[in-house]
Amino acid sequence: MTDIPINLVFEDVLSEAVLKEMLKQSQRPFLVGSRSNKKGFGDIKNSLPAYNNAAKRMPYLVLTDLDNADCPLVILSEWLTQPKHPNLLFRIAVKEVEAWLLAHREAFAKFLGISVDLIPADVDKISDPKQVLINLAKKSKKRELREGIVPDRNSTTKIGKDYNGQLIQFVNESWQVASAQTNSPSLQRAMNVLINFQPTWET
């Protein structure tokens, strides 16, 4: 089985962990090259044409959040005005990558120690997945999780001091795409792209 080289571009370390787990669970022979943490969508937006051009020589998997945009097609049409190269795998989490974590409802409920009934079934319709996740963590009886994910009462930050660390641990140890994608069409589409991807090499 021939390795499929691929570069990763993402908004934060949590998105990186999710992408790496998706590649692993795709059971395809992906071989990750460079990993670029852009710390937000701005640089991804500005650099997407360059990634599209570079994809002629090396596949790129780029993940960003939908956030407040109307739909993924709007983002793609605004960020990339030239034809998209087949080697550019540009995926958008609806509305944030946290929704993809919540999508594995049973595992996430067990992770927090809460009832699975508290987690919405159709996570792509959650308007603010990060806030929903934090509110769920407030209900957890696990002190380390609660203090890591939930911001301090007097803090100006929107997330807890070990937000990424706790959630990355969940992704690495418990998150299963096969279960999660049944509750998230955007995750299912992204995973199908990885499973069916065949690189195109220009001569």
Image (spheres, rainbow, N blue to C red):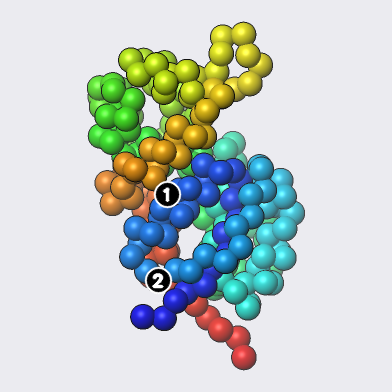
- Give 135 or 170, whichever is nearer the viewer: 170
Dividing the picture into quarters, in which one does residue 78 lie? bottom right
- Disc 2 target residue: 29
- Above or below for 6 versus 202: above
164 sits left or right of 139 in the view: right
Amino acid of disc 1: Ser
Q: CA distance from mark 1 to mark 2?
A: 23 Å
Disc 2 residue crowd, few under 14, some 14–19, many 20+, Cα 10 Å: few
> In the image, what residue occupies the spot 41% across and 23% down?
145
- Disc 1 target residue: 186
Q: Secondary structure at mark 2?
A: loop
Location of the N terminus by quadrant is bottom left
Location of the C terminus by quadrant is bottom right
Q: Secondary structure at mark 1?
A: helix
154 sits left or right of 183 in the view: right
- Above or below for 121 versus 19: above
> In the image, what residue occupies the spot 41% across and 38% down?
169
- Above or below for 73 versus 82: above
193 sits left or right of 63 in the view: left
Amino acid of disc 2: Pro
